[in-house]
Image (tube, helix red, strand yellow):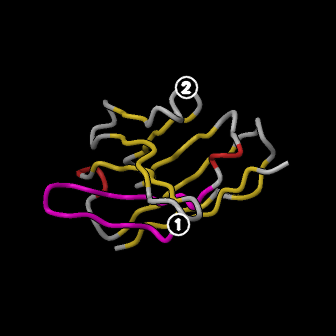
Amino acid sequence: VQLVESGGGLVQPGGSLRLSCAASGFTFSSYRMSWYRQAPGKERELVATIYSDGGGTNYADSVKGRFTISRDNAKNTVYLQMNSLKLEDTAVYYCNARRVSGGYWGQGTQVTVSS
């Protein structure tokens, strides 16, 4: 099983990034997919979730209206489009796959918002 995140980097405030998470080794379409983030000295927090059929999404209040989660079950990939980035969005972003029987984590990708 693998979840491989990509797309992180350094961006100025107000900028955009698109994160991708490529999944393999399990039935991607059956899993709820989420993005979490963890800033230095803080606990990991849930950013966004998309359900297995792609029909439902949830967002943390801090990113509503700025971030969009989506998935392509044909490509076994989940995305996080991040717009209007703020300094406080700086964190390591992790991809998570979950269903009732358990779940998996990716290794994380660093997003740094700095002027």
Residue 65: image tag:
2
**Dot 2, crowdedness within 10 Å: few (<14), some or many (≥20)?**
few
Residue 22: image tag:
none
**For the residue marked with disc 2, what is the amino acid?**
Gly
**For the residue marked with disc 1, what is the amino acid?**
Gly
Dot placed on the residue nearer the N-terminal end, 1 or 2: 2
Q: Residue at x 45, y 53 (%)?
A: 36
Vertical relation: 53 (above or below) 19: above
Horizontal side of residue 112 vs 23, given as left or right:
right
Instruction: Give the magenta range.
Output: 91-107
Counting from the top left corner in percent of width and height, residue 53 is at: 28, 38
Label 1 to label 2, Cα distance in Å?
Answer: 23 Å
Counting from the top left corner in percent of width and height, residue 105 is at: 38, 67
Q: Residue furthest left?
A: 101
71 drawn magenta: no
Q: Residue furthest top?
A: 65
Counting from the top left corner in percent of width and height, residue 68 is at: 52, 35
User: Secondary structure under badge 2?
Assistant: loop
Q: Which residue is mark 1?
A: 108
Counting from the top left corner in percent of width and height, residue 78 is at: 45, 49
